[in-house]
Amino acid sequence: MSKLQLSDLAIFGGKAAFDAELHVGRPNVPDRRRLLERMSDILDRKWLTNNGPYVQEFEQRVAEMIGVKHCIAMCNGTAALEVAIKAADLRDEVIVPSFTFVGTVHALQWQQLKPVFCDVDPLSHNIDPARVEQMITPRTTGIMGVHVWGRPCDIPALTKISKKYNLRLLFDAAHAFGCSHRGRMIGNFGDAEAFSFHATKFFNTFEGGAVVTNNEDLAAKIRLMKNFGFAGNDEVIQIGINGKMSEPSAAMGLSGLENLDEFIKVNRINYQQYRNELEGLQGVRLLTFDESEKCNFQYVVFEVDESVTQVSRDEMLRVLWSENVLARRYFYPGCHRMEPYRSLFPNAGLMLPETERVVERVLCLPTGTSIGSHEIRTICDIIRVVLLNGDVVRKRLRDLQQMMDSKDRKKMH
């Protein structure tokens, strides 16, 4: 049992639990020797980009791992989404969750498409197929699902809807690299799926992404589009952008693939410890994973029910940050409350009751190879003390805020 006392918390004058900040999404770094060998080879070849041998090998390795016909490596996950959207010829309206990273929605709006925000399932946090069907209009051309936390959307239901209404179906799989659905790897569903290999993901290529698909025509189109539409040295046959992955990024990716099982093993151990430590605590719900499926376990997510805990999610966040535990609110406050969407669709929130609830309750905790058992135990001890003394913690935080506000007013005068 924890020996941590209320007086030990930094907000009560105690020393912060950690000297160095613990981050959500701190990069996992693969075997340095293998990475540096590849980097040295790149410099010797002087082939830094433009579909070099490491990019080609990376695409092949990812396609084999997922069991998909085509992997097109990209410079980042947003470019991957944008090109997939363009190649799929989406127009007019596309149904998308608001509970996602804003880049998902920007990828639509950037191309003058109208994002139609759909509510999420309260348990999975993924787009709710029952609500999707209600949002379809004659102007709808596609559905974009997001595999939030790496837990797959209700793929069968979304596939059925897309076929019924003859709509394109794309998936933002930024969280779901290495995950499966009913024994089949994410990347095999819909018309195409887009991965992010950003540094904050459990598997990264420094910065990068990919589109994966089993559609031959779509893959050919995406390959053209990621390289300005070039079909040869001097022949451009359609509009495109510079979305290519560089050789150094591919080298990082290949090195990371060699350590992928290790990264996932660490994430799984961390998740299981969090689950055990937080079990039985009233007012918090740790999101669980289907461990019969392949999963990357890269997010440790829990919801705070303020009516039970007597402290809000944001108050819990303030306590953790004061201890140098930089927990994160995902995806606060919801895309529909960010610009330009809150101006374009000021009443969107009326159709998103579950999204509005989830964005006020969700908190992500540090995991990955940069933390271990001691750090997790300490983080959970802090959470436990806060939950057992919710009313006292809330009063202390409000007193501190009043003191800060008073100091600010004195400065103004």
Image (cartoon, rainbow, N blue to C red):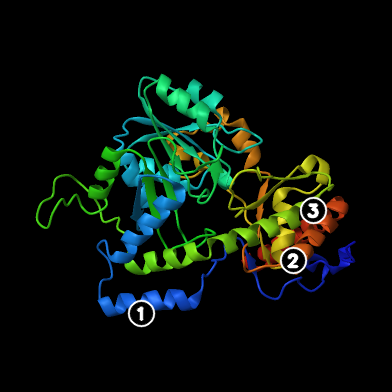
Residue 27 place in picture, x, y as percent: 54, 66
| Few, some or many residues within 10 Å of mark 1 (<14, 14–19, 20+) | few
State how many labels appear: 3
Q: Which residue is mark 3?
A: 276
Between marks 3 and 1, how big is the CA–CA gap? 44 Å
Between marks 1 and 2, how big is the CA–CA gap? 36 Å
Q: Which mark is residue 40?
A: 1
Instruction: Answer with left or right where residue 60 lies relative to residue 47.
Output: right
Q: Is residue 347 above or below residue 218?
A: above
Q: Is residue 228 above or below residue 320?
A: above
Residue 251 place in picture, x, y as percent: 39, 68
Q: Earlier in the sequence, mark 3 or mark 2?
A: 3
Of 81 and 263, the residue lying toward us: 263
Question: Which amino acid, mark 1?
Answer: Ser
Q: Residue at x 54, y 43 (%)?
A: 180
As helix, strand or loop, the secondary structure at mark 2 comes to helix
| Few, some or many residues within 10 Å of mark 3 (<14, 14–19, 20+) | few
Disc nearest the viewer among 1 and 2: 1
Question: Which amino acid, mark 3?
Answer: Asn
Of 242 and 322, the residue lying toward us: 242
Instruction: Answer with left or right where residue 229 lies relative to residue 67.
Output: left
Q: Earlier in the sequence, mark 1 or mark 2?
A: 1
Question: Is residue 333 visible to the viewer in this orientation of the structure?
Answer: no
Of 73 and 413, the residue lying toward us: 73
Q: Are marks 1 and 2 in contact (CB under 8 Å)?
A: no
Question: Which amino acid, mark 2?
Answer: Ser
Residue 410 place in picture, x, y as percent: 68, 66
Residue 176 place in picture, x, y as percent: 52, 48
Q: Which residue is mark 2?
A: 373
Q: Residue at x 74, y 48 (%)?
A: 312
As helix, strand or loop, the secondary structure at mark 3 comes to helix
